[in-house]
Image (tube, coloured by chain):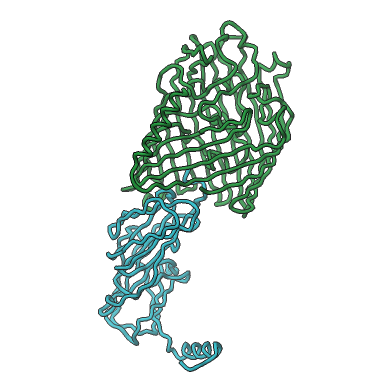
Amino acid sequence: MASMITKLSAALALFAIGQAGAVEISGQGQLQTTWQHDDNRKAWYQPGWGVARFGKGEPDITLSRGAIDWRVDFASAWSLHGVTQYVPDPDDKLGFTELYLQYRTLPKNGRRFIMRAGGFYPKFSIENPDIGWSSPYTYQYSAINAWIGEEVRVFGGEVAIEQPQTRRSRGQGFKGVFGVFKGNDPAGTLLAWRGFTVNDRQSVFNESLSFAAVESLNTPQLQHQAQHVEPFSEVDGRFGYYVGYHRDFSNRSEINVYWYDNNGDPSKINYRTGQYAWDTKFISAAWRYKLTPQTHILAQGMLGNTAMGVNRGVDNDFNSWFLLLTHQRDEWRFSMRGEQFKVIDKDDWQFDPNQSDGYALTATVKYRINSNWLVGGEFLRLTTTVANREAFNGKPKQSDNVWRLSAEYRFNL
Amino acid sequence: MLNLTIFGRIAVVIAMLQAGLVNALEVQIVDADKQPLANAAVWLQGDGFDNKRTTLDYKMEQKDKAFVPHILMVQAGTQVSFPNLDPILHHVYSFSAAKPFELKLYRDDPKQVLFDQTGVVELGCNIHDWMLGYIVVVDSPLFAVTDSSGKVSIDLGAQQASALKLNVWHERFENIDKIEQHPLSIVNNTQAITYQIKQTLVAPLQDFSDGFDDY
């Protein structure tokens, strides 16, 4: 995988050098510091059984996020895009969360063609349009998008035909998307052994994420599975794909539906890294509706399945939804989100309980002091029931209260 | 003028207004329901007017992710600059027959574009699809955009003019290239006339755009 990303970066750099003419670099940066009060449980990546970032053993005040969302525009329809991100927990990583080349035409005759090649997020999320795929609404993303941020990224190519909503199209916009990718074979690992959680930690390319020492990994059946996931790695050599459709009504109501299938071969394992290819597929549907220019509703639902092992020894269905209401008043933004999530263990490996479920309520206030400074506070009430905690402390059910105060500095490149 | 104080000058202007010495033809544009129509482009064509040229510094700004002004009227042969006042890049384009052009992503740089053909030029931004602006290129110095009461005041530069053509355009015309024309046989520079739009207007698109639509 490392070599794949090196090759990708080299190819993109070569392309950039080969582009003649004026080059325009632009973008936005964000530095965020956070004070957090939580129930002091060790976070999964430590590794521990906690479901909140910045738990036990980590300072209360952190530089929680550093991101530069940049683009280099060439004289043609080509541009190079990247998000360079600093992730403090657990070991101060600096890496890319996205890096891709884009070809995007003008909407001649009302339609444009868009092509992306590299490593990036398919645009499933309606919640993460801010700098570096962050959310303008809450600090911590919904369980759905927290999981996407942790374990879903494609390395490949995407083509799209878009009719932007303009006067010419009478406000009717749509976009059809098709992508083919490599990598992302272990996606689903965290859902099986940790379950969904609510957080804003995005994995950088090449990242390896630990999770708690679940007992079943000591069994002969699962002995080759490492106690960490390398979510973006390639294991089975097969291509995955996704298709998506966006519909936009006058910028007021926007809907997107995606089908994602990493086409993993669950019988394949990389013994060196301890990573299986999980056969992970899901459907995601998201909707944003502007009740008024200031008050918006956002909703997203996801339904999927993930499995690993020759006979799909670990086989889980998963689903989640959220509903978010946000209101902007002058420099203030108030947001509330309610959500539910669930992993259903379908296989007959009794020694490896994967079922988990939970619900969460998030309330956030943000205040923009000026174009550079943004401050805010958030309360998250997260209740999770994870079956494999039984073997750890006899208490599958756990409630977490996470209080957060953040200040961030934003700048333009 | 006499050497007057500022108050003295104001008094003179008021007196001139009352005496009808400051003249202008007032045109009000109304829709099918006789409601005043704001943001309509109005211009008068007639013999002797097409050669007079006002040379002003015309600008179509991009400010807060919008074209400012929303509708700009210029005479054919005018250079218009496109200053970007936002901290982000814009990418202005037009596919209109009167002036197809593209200003690839840029900041600050007030690039100039020559509008030498009459017609309606619809402007878009390739980054922010909801940004919309118009440049109405006309072959007359007698033009204005209606205010909120649907009115324009146009000084004919003479007491009376004859054989004029009143032209009206609005962005809600179904076919935005279909300009409405109405002959005016004789008009006085103190007259007020009302013109009712003949075609039906498409429903206005309410603007719900925010900073996160371009994702």
Q: Where is A412 relative to B190, above or below?
A: above
Indicate left or right for B37 with A186 as reference. Answer: left
Whether A198 is drawn above or below A409: the answer is above
Is residue A348 visible in the rendered structure shown here? no
Residue placed farthest to the bottom in the image?
B2
Question: In the depicted view, which residue is nearer to us: A7 or A189?
Answer: A7
Residue B87 image position (x, y, % from top left): 50, 53
Question: Which quadrant of the view contains residue B135?
Answer: bottom left
- Residue B181: image location, x then y, percent: 30, 70
Left or right: A38 in relation to B38 = right
Which residue is farthest top?
A220
Give percent across and percent down for residue B94: 34, 55
Residue B121 vertical position relative to residue B193 in the rendered view, above or below: above
Tell me, by letter, which chain the rendering colours green: A
Rendering coords of residue B47 (x, y %): 25, 79
Tally the numbered discs.
0
**Residue at x 27% of width, y 57% of height:** B97
**Which chain did the renderer colour cyan?**
B
- Residue A335 visible here: yes
Residue found at x 38% / y 32%: A11
Pick the residue in front: A170 or B129. B129
